Image (spheres, helix red, strand yellow):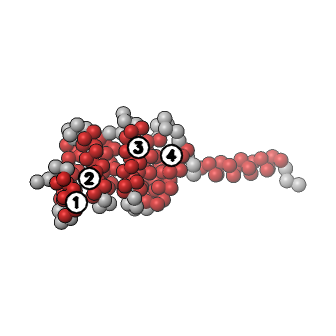
Amino acid sequence: MISTRFLTSAALALALAACGDSDPQTLIADGNKALNTNDPNTALEKFSEAATALKPGDPQYLDAKLGVVEALVPTDAQKASDEFMALVTSFPDQVGEKQFIQVGGRMITERKYLEAIALIDKGIKRAGGESPKLHALMKRIEQEAANDKGVIDALKGLGYTG
């Protein structure tokens, strides 16, 4: 006969093993590793799981949600932008120029230029037009996409070139 003590120990070991992957800090770290190795699907999975395990007031909540945003950029840059702007609205004191640079930079790296222009423009306007770093991202887009008429027209339409 199997002892109750053995069954309790086995159940506890299984429970601890199951919880090991749900530590938000570990999930965020795993999400960042996946982003850095160009695996946005795994990154999205890890960041989403971390965000679900956290509450909006938790210190790592924004890290998890920003990770979700960055992981969405390669496959759905518009959804990434929408989710990012929801964070800006919900956390106006915690989401600012640094985060606009982070997400806008990711969009540029992924060559999601039109979405990056729209997002960075919102960041510049939010900063009252006074953001040299965000203006520098617009210049980067202009240089990288110099041969893309649609991108250049979008920049011109917002007054960032010419």
The amino acid type found where label 3 is placed reads Ala
Where does the N terminus fall, quadrant-wise? Answer: bottom right
The amino acid type found where label 2 is placed reads Ile
Among numbered discs 1 and 3, the one appearing first in the sequence: 3
Among numbered discs 3 and 4, the one appearing first in the sequence: 4
Image point (29%, 41%), residue name: 97
Q: Which residue is mark 4?
A: 51
Is 38 in front, or is 124?
124
Local crowd size for mark 2, using a 10 Å CA cut-off: few (<14), some (14–19), many (≥20)? many
Q: CA distance from mark 3 to mark 4?
A: 14 Å
Question: SS class of the residue under badge 3?
Answer: helix
- Residue 121's disc is none
Among numbered discs 2 and 3, the one appearing first in the sequence: 3
Q: Which residue is mark 2?
A: 117
The amino acid type found where label 1 is placed reads Val
Among numbered discs 1 and 2, the one appearing first in the sequence: 2
Q: CA distance from mark 1 to mark 2?
A: 8 Å
Q: CA distance from mark 1 to mark 3?
A: 25 Å
Q: Which residue is mark 1?
A: 151
